[in-house]
Amino acid sequence: MRSAFKTFICLSFSLYFSLSSGAPTSLSKRGEDVEPMKRLTPDEIKVLYEKRRVSEFGCKEADINAPHMKEILEAFDKLKYDASAHASGAIRGGFHGSVINHPHNTKLEIHKRFVVKTLDDDKPSVEKIRMELDGLTQAGQLEACETITPPSKPGAAKPIPVFYITQKKIEGPTLEEVGKPEGFAVLKEKTPESDEKWGMIGKAILDRLRDLAKRRHIAYLDINVKNIKVQGRILEPGKFAIGVIDWGYAGWRPMVHLVSKGASQEEQDKELESYMKAVTPLVTSVVNQAKELARNLGSNPGSLTTSPHSPPPKSLENSPHNSNPGSQHGSPKPQAPLVLHQPGSPKA
């Protein structure tokens, strides 16, 4: 059975590339190397996204005179060279840009707030940028995307646009910080109750990853204490939720069964279970790391003392994109453009 499933993965992955953008046959030969947690190679990313356009994800040229854009640009200018802002996390640097809270957040309710991320480095290829936009879209976290192209200079190469990506703010402490909020003090204890709560967190993370894979058809890969958040103040069933952040090109991959209309339900289920089998030990390791970090805090309260009072309401959960009702899990069509449910900038 394992051999048959491996063959299905190989054929389906080849089909995924060929349907997406006419992949060369040489790429299909690498299908045998596909594993549930294997990141896409630069060549594979290029094949998947070279014919996609950022406009498919709602990206448009920004009006720098628009009030909301002025606020965003002023916020970045104010924080970019402020050492205290970097120290406090008011602005966070990434590989190819920075992230800040949206200037409108003070007027917005919790779970309805945003962050703005820039991609302002020419190191990531345009295909990798498209993959990040795709990941945010599939995860239901992309709100708006605007670009500003610097003025061109005589004799110089065409300037690279700066992307301003507005996305949902995933509230709550990360696993790295989860021992700090007052409501989570039990996590710092070395007691059976504390162990039980950590077990609940681990199960909730696995449930969230399964949900993303099954309903949204995305295999999240970048599982670590910085990218998993706990939302809510009461660690009881139904009273807290798990948030996942960072949908960069290295952080996820499409589930292969998306494009195989001929795949049986058994084959689809096997792919899902293969992914879950791969992530389970990773989640266990990350939870143990977070537990150690929390217990090393001892009686120190830490600086982070707040957390959302409740998990996000179900009404804020977007439905999957491009789902095919003919499949129990749905079957998104990667060759079809993805569109935002509500394109445009957030309004106060």
Image (tube, helix red, strand yellow):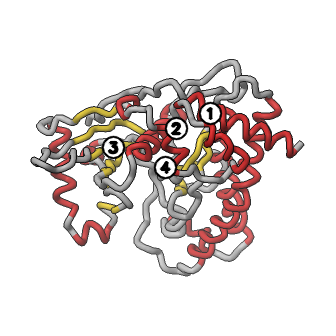
Task: Tell me the residue at 76%/28% (across/down).
Answer: 263
Task: Tell me the residue at 56%/48% (across/down).
Answer: 252
Helix, strand or loop at label 3? It is strand
Helix, strand or loop at label 4? It is loop
Sequence-wise first label, 2 or 3: 2
Helix, strand or loop at label 2? It is helix
| Crowd rating for badge 3 (residues with CA inside 10 Å; few <14, some 14–19, many 20+) | many
| Crowd rating for badge 1 (residues with CA inside 10 Å; few <14, some 14–19, many 20+) | many
Helix, strand or loop at label 1? It is helix
- Looking at the rendered image, the disc whose residue lies closer to the viewer, 1 or 4, is 1
Q: Say whether marks 4 and 3 touch (CB < 8 Å).
A: no
Q: Say whether marks 2 and 3 touch (CB < 8 Å).
A: no
Looking at the picture, which amino acid does disc 4 mark?
Answer: Tyr
Q: Quadrant of residue 62?
A: top left
Q: Report which residue position mark 4 lands on.
A: 249
| Residue in the foreground of this view, choosing between 68 and 189 | 68
Looking at the picture, which amino acid does disc 2 mark?
Answer: Leu
Q: Say whether marks 1 and 2 touch (CB < 8 Å).
A: yes
Locate residue 46, reporting x and y percent: 48, 43
Sequence-wise first label, 4 or 3: 3
User: What label does residue 292 carry, if any?
Assistant: none
Sequence-wise first label, 1 or 4: 1
Locate residue 345, reporting x and y percent: 28, 34
Sequence-wise first label, 2 or 4: 2
With respect to residue 69, does 57 lie above or below? above
**Residue 17 shown left or right of residue 106 in the figure:** right
Q: Report which residue position mark 1 lands on.
A: 16
Looking at the picture, which amino acid does disc 1 mark?
Answer: Tyr
Q: Say whether marks 1 and 4 touch (CB < 8 Å).
A: no
Looking at the picture, which amino acid does disc 3 mark?
Answer: Ile
Q: Report which residue position mark 2 lands on.
A: 48
Locate residue 102, reporting x and y percent: 29, 47
